[in-house]
């Protein structure tokens, strides 16, 4: 019963490095989302996708990129990492109907030094 | 833009007391509202989902109400237990793509 799987769980990057955060779901959900959570704050939407090949920006997209080539996977790419991107990143998915709950992964804790 | 607020940011109650957690939102045009629980260092666990047409939802000791006209939702946890200690977040779905606007959460400590 995997649900939403995020890898890695932890990562430390140097300023200027790049990396990809992986997210996979096995529930055949059409909608997928990337959020970031800063200490003491709620989650903010970075990017979302409503199906393979379709993505759009959320509230805080600067410094990130996404792609969605399959229904299952929704990777988040950080280019030129900056200290302001130190955060906990959560991936979520939803069946695609507004009345359905979102399912979250366990998060990736990213520090940029 | 939808703003979601949770007050207080933290509270502590003795075991056995009922918990009342508040969530307010500025735009009543929401599709639904979801309550989550987050344990330290963990992801979010969905507790209750209330559709915009509903007034409340119940699951075991948990009851969530929704009053769109006043822009409020309340999560009640009956007979609190130390295992209820966690951060509780509410999130309102603001459009047909299911995008959430989250509150910052209420950190709850239930003391034995």
Image: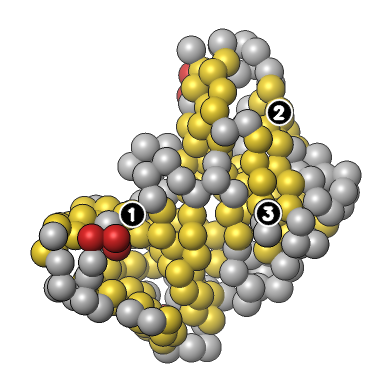
In the rendered image, residue B31, in percent from the top left (x then y), is placed at 57, 75
Mark 3 and mark 1: Cα distance apart in space: 24 Å
Q: Which residue is mark 3?
A: A2
Q: Residue at x 63, y 53 (%)?
A: A92
In the rendered image, residue A5, in percent from the top left (x then y), is placed at 66, 46
Is disc 3 surrounded by few (<14), some (14 to 19) or many (20+) residues within 10 Å?
few
Asked if one can make out residue A47 in the rendered structure from this viewpoint, the answer is: no
Q: Secondary structure at mark 1?
A: strand
Q: Quadrant of residue A9?
A: top right
Q: Are marks 2 and 1 on the same chain?
A: no
Depth order, front residue of B99/B10: B10
Q: Quadrant of residue B80?
A: bottom left
Scheme by which the image is coloured? secondary structure
Q: Which residue is mark 2?
A: A20
Which numbered disc, 3 or 1, marks the residue closer to the eye? 3
Q: Residue at x 52, y 82 (%)?
A: B52
In the rendered image, residue B70, in percent from the top left (x then y), is placed at 33, 80
Marks 2 and 3 in Cβ contact (< 8 Å): no
Mark 2 and mark 3: Cα distance apart in space: 21 Å
Asked if one can make out residue A49 in the rendered structure from this viewpoint, the answer is: yes
In the rendered image, residue A113, in percent from the top left (x then y), is placed at 48, 12
Depth order, front residue of A97/B79: B79
Q: Residue at x 50, y 75 (%)?
A: B49
How many labels, in total?
A: 3
Q: Which residue is mark 1?
A: B87
Depth order, front residue of A78/B68: A78
In primary-sequence order, the first of circles 2 and 3 is: 3
Left or right, B110 with reference to A94: left
């Amino acid at each position: 019963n995997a649900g939403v799987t995020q890898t890695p769980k932890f990562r430390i990057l140097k300023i200027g490095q790049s990396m990809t955060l992986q997210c996979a779901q096995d529930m055949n959900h059409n909608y997928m989302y990337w959020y970031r959570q800063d200490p003491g704050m709620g989650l903010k939407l970075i990017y979302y996708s409503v199906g393979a090949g379709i993505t759009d920006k959320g509230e805080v997209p600067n410094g990130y990129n996404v792609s969605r080539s399959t229904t299952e996977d929704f990777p988040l790419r950080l280019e030129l990492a900056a200290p302001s991107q130190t955060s906990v990143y959560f991936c979520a998915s939803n069946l695609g109907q507004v009345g359905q709950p979102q399912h979250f992964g366990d998060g990736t804790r990213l520090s940029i030094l | 833009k939808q703003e979601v607020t949770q007050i207080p940011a933290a509270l502590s109650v003795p075991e056995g007391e009922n918990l009342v957690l508040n969530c307010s939102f500025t735009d009543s045009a929401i599709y639904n509202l979801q309550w989550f629980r987050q344990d330290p260092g963990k992801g979010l666990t969905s507790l209750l989902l209330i559709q915009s047409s509903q007034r409340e939802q119940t699951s075991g000791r948990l009851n969530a109400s929704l009053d769109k006209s006043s822009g409020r939702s309340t999560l009640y946890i009956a007979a609190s237990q130390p295992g209820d200690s966690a951060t509780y977040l509410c999130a309102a779905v603001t459009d047909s793509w299911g995008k959430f606007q989250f509150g910052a959460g209420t950190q709850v400590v239930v003391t034995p």
